[in-house]
C-alpha cells in the first residue's frame, strides 16, 4: 500500500479491546445503485442492511454511497449495480442467495430475496443482518474483480450456523487480504 496519501481509520479489534489502524486514501468511495423488484425487503429492512453494509466497508476505509440508478459518480468512476428481487432466477447454484458478475462491464449483482427468506424465515431478526452480509459479500466479489472466497469472515463460500449466530452479535469481518484487494481496486492501483 502507498502510505504517502493514506489517512488512518481506527477500527476496534474483534472483541479484543484493541484497535488497529486501517489505512486508506482520502477518497475511497464506491457508488452503489440499488434497485428492488417484486416483493423485496421493506424499507426498514433495506435501510438496516444499507447502514450495516456501509459500516462493514467503513471498517476497512471504504465509503459506500447508496444512490438511485443514474445518480452519483465518484472520482474513481466505480459504480456498482445491486438488484434485490423475488423473481425466480434460473441457472444458478440452488443454494446461492445471490450472484455477481465481477468481470462484466456493468458490475451487476443480484440478491435473490425469496432464497434469503427461505434461509431464515420472513419474521426472523436475522433477515436484515443476512441481507447486509449477502450484499457485502457480492459487492466484494465485484470490488475484488475476482471470483474467490476466504476461509473466514464475510467472504467465506458458505456460512455456518455459527456464522449466522455471529451476525446477530456483530458483522463478520473482512480478512486483511480481502481489504487489500478491495483497496487496490477502489483506489485505482489495480485494473478491472
Image: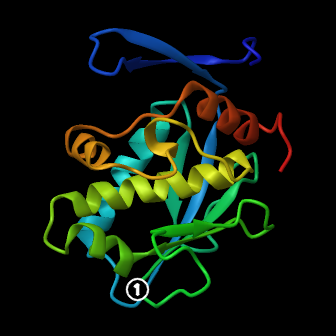
Residue at 71% x, 53% y is: 78
Using the image as rendered, state which of residue 186 and residue 129 is in the foreground: 129
- The answer to which image quadrant residue 44 occupies is bottom left
Q: Which of the image's four quarters has the N terminus?
A: top right
Q: In the picture shown, does residue 77 fall above or below 45? A: above
- The answer to which image quadrant residue 95 occupies is bottom left
Work out which residue is located at the far top of the displayed protein and give it. Answer: 18
Residue 48 in view of the camera: no
Q: In the picture shown, does residue 122 fall above or below 180? A: below
- How many numbered marks are there? 1
| Residue position for label 1 | 86
Residue at 20% x, 72% y is: 121
How far across and how far down the image is residue 179, in percent? 60, 32
Using the image as rendered, state which of residue 136 and residue 25 is in the foreground: 136
Residue at 45% x, 53% y is: 158
How far across and how far down the image is residue 75, in percent? 73, 46
Give the colouring mode of the picture.
rainbow
How far across and how far down the image is residue 141, in percent? 63, 52
Q: State left or right for residue 114 relative to residue 44.
A: right
Q: State left or right for residue 163 relative to residue 173.
A: left
- The answer to which image quadrant residue 122 occupies is bottom left
Amino acid at each position: 500500500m502507498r502510505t504517502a496519501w493514506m489517512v488512518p481509520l481506527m477500527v476496534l479489534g474483534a472483541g479484543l479491546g484493541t484497535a488497529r489502524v486501517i489505512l486508506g486514501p482520502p477518497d475511497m468511495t464506491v457508488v452503489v445503485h440499488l434497485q428492488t423488484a417484486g416483493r423485496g425487503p421493506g424499507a426498514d429492512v433495506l435501510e438496516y442492511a444499507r447502514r450495516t453494509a456501509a459500516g462493514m466497508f467503513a471498517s476497512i476505509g471504504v465509503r459506500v454511497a447508496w444512490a438511485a440508478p443514474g445518480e452519483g459518480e465518484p472520482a474513481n468512476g466505480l459504480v456498482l449495480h445491486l438488484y434485490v428481487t423475488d423473481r425466480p432466477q434460473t441457472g444458478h447454484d440452488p443454494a446461492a442467495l445471490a450472484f455477481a458478475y465481477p468481470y462484466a462491464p456493468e458490475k451487476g449483482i443480484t440478491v435473490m430475496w425469496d432464497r434469503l427468506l427461505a434461509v431464515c424465515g420472513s419474521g426472523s431478526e436475522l433477515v436484515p443482518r443476512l441481507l447486509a452480509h449477502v450484499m457485502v459479500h457480492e459487492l466484494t466479489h465485484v470490488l475484488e474483480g475476482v471470483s474467490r472466497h476466504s476461509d473466514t469472515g464475510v467472504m467465506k463460500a458458505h456460512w455456518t450456523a455459527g456464522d449466522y449466530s455471529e451476525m446477530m452479535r456483530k458483522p463478520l469481518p473482512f480478512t486483511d487480504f480481502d481489504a487489500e484487494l478491495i483497496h487496490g481496486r477502489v483506489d485505482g492501483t489495480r485494473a478491472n
